[in-house]
Amino acid sequence: MSAADGAVSVTPAEDAGRVRPISIGTLSSLYSGFLSAYDAVGLGLVDESEAPVLARLFGGPAPWMHDFF
């Protein structure tokens, strides 16, 4: 996975045995801001070594919704 100029691209790893996959639920939680990368480490969902990169990619303000419809 690489990120530059606001764009992210994902390519298959050459040695997939050394990369721990992230479930769609974890990825969704990171993307939406519901779960921080460091919380995901604490829950055992991602490796500790991946947390700084995931925090930079998915870090941002907490999700919220205006409740007036």
Image (spheres, rainbow, N blue to C red):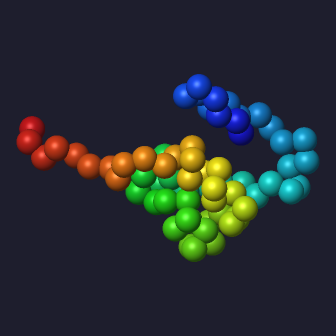
Residue 45 placement: quadrant: bottom right
Q: Is 4 displayed left or right of 60 in the figure?
A: right
Q: Residue at x 68, y 66 (%)?
A: 48
- Placement of 36 over or under 11, stated as above or below: below
Residue 51 x %, y %: 63, 59
Q: Quadrant of the C terminus?
A: top left
Q: Is residue 61 visible?
A: yes
Q: Residue at x 46, y 60 (%)?
A: 35
The residue sitting at the right extreme is 15
Q: Is residue 24 visible?
A: no
Residue 38 placement: quadrant: bottom right
Closer-to-camera residue (23/49)? 49
Count of picture labels:
0
Q: Residue at x 77, y 34 (%)?
A: 11
The residue sitting at the left extreme is 68
- Placement of 11 over or under 34, stated as above or below: above
Residue 47 x %, y %: 70, 65
Q: Is 47 displayed left or right of 15 in the figure?
A: left
Q: Quadrant of the N terminus?
A: top right
Q: Residue at x 57, y 73 (%)?
A: 43
Residue 49 placement: quadrant: bottom right
Closer-to-camera residue (35/69)? 35
